[in-house]
Amino acid sequence: MSNPDTILVTGGAGFIGSHTVVELLQAGYAVVALDNFANAKPSVISRICTLAGRDFTFVEGDVRDPGCMAALFRDHPIQTVIHFAGLKAVGESTRVPLTYYQNNVTGTLNLLEAMRGAGCRNLVFSSSATVYGDPAEVPIREDSPLSATNPYGRSKLMIEEICRDLAKSEPGWRIALLRYFNPVGAHPSGLLGEDPQGVPNNLMPYLLQVASGHRPHLEVFGQDYPTPDGTGVRDYLHVVDLALGHLAALKALPRIEGAIPINLGTGRGYSVLEMIQAMEKVMGHPIPWQFGPRRPGDIALCYANPDRAHTMLGWRAERDLMAMCSDGLTWIKSNSSLNSALA
């Protein structure tokens, strides 16, 4: 690619951001990545370069700092932004809601102001299926009712509304609002993966820690949901497929006008027990688990209708549940520092 576009990736050292930076670099883009290492480690930067076979510009900074945002656009010829930076734990958001609104909403406002000032109006935003709340029906379409049930989800929904208002008020904005379902797995190399702080909030990282012997058992929250086996059903998506979805959205931006929501999911739901069975198949032996009570706020069913992503972006998820489990397991087994922290 001659004279490659320069892409700003906020949260570029995080779980999804790091995988996306690898795909961007391998596709020939110039990348400026920003991260404050709140949920990432500096070692990720060299790992990205190793995988991509290329270097990129990294800036340690925070989207909550307007001066930092203005400097990024002053110092680099940024054409498009992929915006991941933000906090993402649902449970934590209910305990410290102001922190989530400050990080996610205020941080995004600072970014959008800096983009306006620089005349950059191309944005791929990391939204979430949590904006659908407890869905009225599945599979979930982009025109389904929006109703977040926790501060994290509300912060994503607020940002979507801000983007819609901005795009209506000023011509030229091209914004893809990517609503992810449940990103899991890791880069097949074992160099990049999810490294949650403390006890994981989500099923897959917890399941991986049990499978690798670093936690005694998995607690399955609830066995009386209106699902085939009584456990919650979710749409799990391999993180590499998700990263490729951002690349597809980036390429599709010239055809987008305004702010358009797009689901990124497989269109298939898996129950908690199905996830355990898949991991057991990859491991070759049983995994200890037990039933516990439902968690407040958990819903029974959540999976995507991904047709719009295929129609608008030419994107489909390709990696199956076995790849999600085996790549996740490779990641956790390959990282001795992560293992020792869990032991």
Image: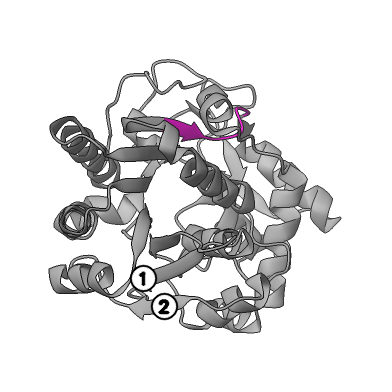
**15 or 228: nearer the viewer:** 15
**293 or 173: nearer the viewer:** 173
Residue at 42% from the left image edge and 60% from the top image edge: 7
Binning the other alpha carbons within 10 Å of mark 1 as few (below 14), some (14 to 19) or many (20 upward) gives many
Quadrant of the image occupied by residue 106: bottom left
Disc sitting over residue 34 in the figure: 1
**76 or 232: nearer the viewer:** 76
Residue at 49% from the left image edge and 38% from the top image edge: 252
Q: Do labels 2 and 1 touch, CB within 8 Å?
A: yes
Q: Where is residue 146 shown, x and y percent of the image?
A: 29, 25
Q: Which residue is mark 2?
A: 58
Q: Where is residue 126 shown, x and y percent of the image?
A: 39, 47
Q: Which residues are magenta?
A: 262-268
Q: Residue furthest top?
A: 137
Where 108 falls versus 330 (above or below)? above
Residue at 51% from the left image edge and 28% from the top image edge: 312
Q: Classify the position of the C terminus by image quarter.
A: bottom right
Q: Where is residue 130 shown, x and y percent of the image?
A: 37, 37
Specify the amino acid type for callout 2. Answer: Phe
Q: Residue furthest right?
A: 284
Quadrant of the image occupied by residue 83: bottom left
The reply to whether residue 315 is visible in this rendering is yes
Q: Residue furthest front?
A: 2
**18 or 253: nearer the viewer:** 253
